[in-house]
Amino acid sequence: IAAAVAVAEYGDIIAVAEGTYTENVVLPVGVTLRSADCKEVVIDGKVTCEGQNTLRHLTINGLNPDGCIVAQGDIWCEQLTVLAVADSAAVVTTGAVQNMVFRRCRFYNPNNDQSILVHDTGGDYFEMSSCIVDWRNTVEPTLDVTVGTIVLTNNTIVSLGSENGGLLLAAVDNLLIGQNIFHATTFDTLISGTGSENIALTTHNYFIGTFSEDTGQDVASVSLAGLDPLDL
């Protein structure tokens, strides 16, 4: 892959043949990395995106503890499987990341001390749609995101055994959470950023677990009408 990246220019698409590649990949600005013909492509290493990058139909085994995907600029991810090692985040953001989109992705780590993703440096837009997250035993929030607009729809997020199994979401302008399943031992924090202009927790969200008394203020500050919390 590195040989193809070395000659890639803005707008190029690198289609990777089926197989396992043990290497760290650094994508230049505006380059797309995807599998050829939707075949199974496994990258044993880290993928660094310099900005305006698309990752599609790949499996990333993050053997590096400083993250599986490092986003230095805007990224669009679709049909990824991200397998993180212990104490490693799935996505690490550095620099000016304005837009991040994850659709039909899978994130897995059975024993971790880090969030799946921390993006608290600002930005315009964050979306996670139709994703499956199995992120257990962390001491941090499963998702820690602060941007202008946050959209979470049709996801299943499991964070059993975590000290803070909820979401730490601070939306400056708009927050939409709809048709998700959240399964945690305890929801220590659900939502922050209560000064947001347009917060919409739509119906058909299911919370399986116990709401901690410590989060009463955070949870109460957003209308939970229409939700179905299940206390197991």
Image (spheres, helix red, strand yellow):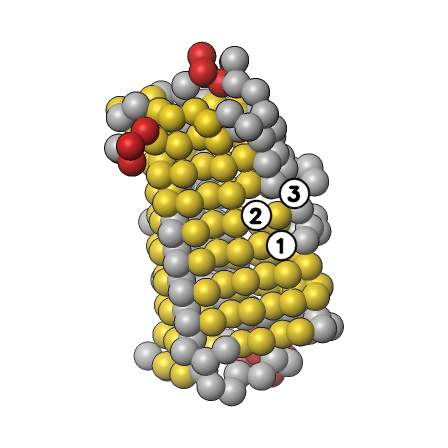
Q: Residues within 10 Å of mark 3 (few under 14, many from 20)?
A: many
As helix, strand or loop, the secondary structure at mark 2 comes to strand
Q: Which residue is mark 2?
A: 100
Is residue 185 at least partly visible in the picture? Answer: no
Q: Which residue is mark 3?
A: 97
Residue shown at 60% from the left, 41% from the top: 74
Taking depth in this image into account, of 84 and 123 the one nearest to the observer is 123
- Where's residue 159, x and y in %? 39, 60
Q: Which residue is mark 1?
A: 125
Q: Residues within 10 Å of mark 1 (few under 14, many from 20)?
A: many
* Image quarter of the N terminus: top left
- Where's residue 27, x and y in %? 53, 26
Taking depth in this image into account, of 90 and 132 the one nearest to the observer is 132
Residue shown at 45% from the left, 16% from the top: 4
Residue shown at 57% from the left, 48% from the top: 100
Q: How far apart are labels 2 and 3 at the CA level?
A: 7 Å
Q: How far apart are labels 1 and 3 at the CA level?
A: 9 Å
The answer to whether residue 179 is above or below residue 168 is below
Kindly check if marks 2 and 3 are in contact, taking CB atoms under 8 A apart as contact.
yes
